[in-house]
Image (spheres, rainbow, N blue to C red):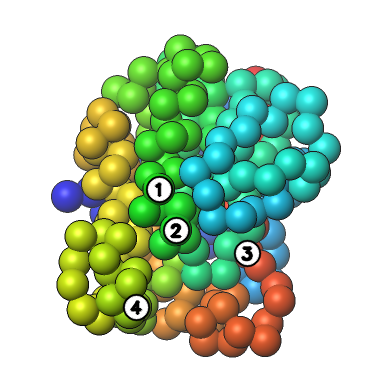
Amino acid sequence: MTAVDQSFRLGGDVIYRCQAFQQFIWQSHGFGTRRANPAASVTLRQIHSDIVRDAHGLKDREQEGDALLTNETGLSIGVRTADCVPILLLDSKERAVAAVHAGWRGSASEIVRCAIHKMFTSFGSEPANIWAAIGPSIRECCYEVGPEVMARFGREGRGNLDLAGTNACQMQASGVPAHQIFDSCLCTACQLETFHSYRREPQDSERLISAIVRIS
C-alpha cells in the first residue's frame, strides 16, 4: 500500500503540490491544472516508451523519451499529461530529481523503474532515499481498457486498470519505501473542471505540466 497523502494542496497559484515534499527546501515542484502550470525549462517529445534522458545540455523537446532527470541547480524538468500518470521523484540525499510520464505503454515497460535505475547509475541515488509524488491522472474508476491492454499487465478480458497503483507497486519493487510514495488520488476524468482529460475530451489538445527543480 502507498501512503495516500491527504495533504496534497492546491496553492494560491492554482497548482497542486505534495506537502510531504515541502520539507525538502532545496527543491520546488508542482502539478498543473486547467488554470495554471509550473514552469518547465526542459521537456521531451513523449512517445510512451521506457526511455529516460539526463536533462543536462538539452533544449526543450529536443529529444524523445518519457522521463527526465537531473541534479543540476536551477534546471526545471517536466512532463506533459492528460490522463497519463505524472510522477515526480527526488533523492533526499544526493538532491537529484526526476519527472516521469507513465501511460499504459510506459507503465507496462516500467518507465518509473527505469528512471529510478538511471538515477542510481547517474547520480548514486539509492532507492531508499527516493521520495515519489504521483499526480493527477485517470484512475481505475474511469479507465476501462480492452483485453489487449489488460494482457500487458497479466490480466484477461476487459477491465479497469489502476495505472497509479501499478506504478506505485513498481517503485516499491525497485526499493522505494512505501511510506515515501505519495498519491494525490486526483482523477483527471472525474474532475474535468480542474484537469484536462484526453479520454473525456479527445478534441482537447491541452496538457497538464508536472515539473520539479533543484533550487539549491
Q: CA distance from mark 2 to mark 4?
A: 12 Å
For label 3, the SS is strand
Q: CA distance from mark 4 to mark 1?
A: 17 Å
- The residue wearing badge 2 is 105
Q: Residue shown at 40%/48% (left/top)?
A: 109
Residue farthest right in this picture: 59
- The residue wearing badge 3 is 208
User: Residue 185: x, y in percent?
Assistant: 35, 64
User: Residue 116: x, y in percent?
Assistant: 42, 30
- The residue wearing badge 4 is 145
* Tag 2 near tag 4, CB within 8 Å: no
Circle nearer the N terminus (2, 4) = 2
Q: Nearer the viewer, mark 4 or mark 3?
A: 4
Q: CA distance from mark 4 to mark 3?
A: 22 Å
The disc placed on residue 109 is 1
* Vertical order, 87 against 116 (above or below): below
Neighbour tally class for label 3: few under 14, some 14-19, many 20 plus, Cα within 10 Å: many
* Tag 2 near tag 3, CB within 8 Å: no
- The image quadrant of residue 60 is top right
Q: Horizontally, is 161 left or right of 70 in the view? A: left
Q: Residue shown at 43%/35% (left/top)?
A: 114
Q: Amino acid at mark 1?
A: Ser
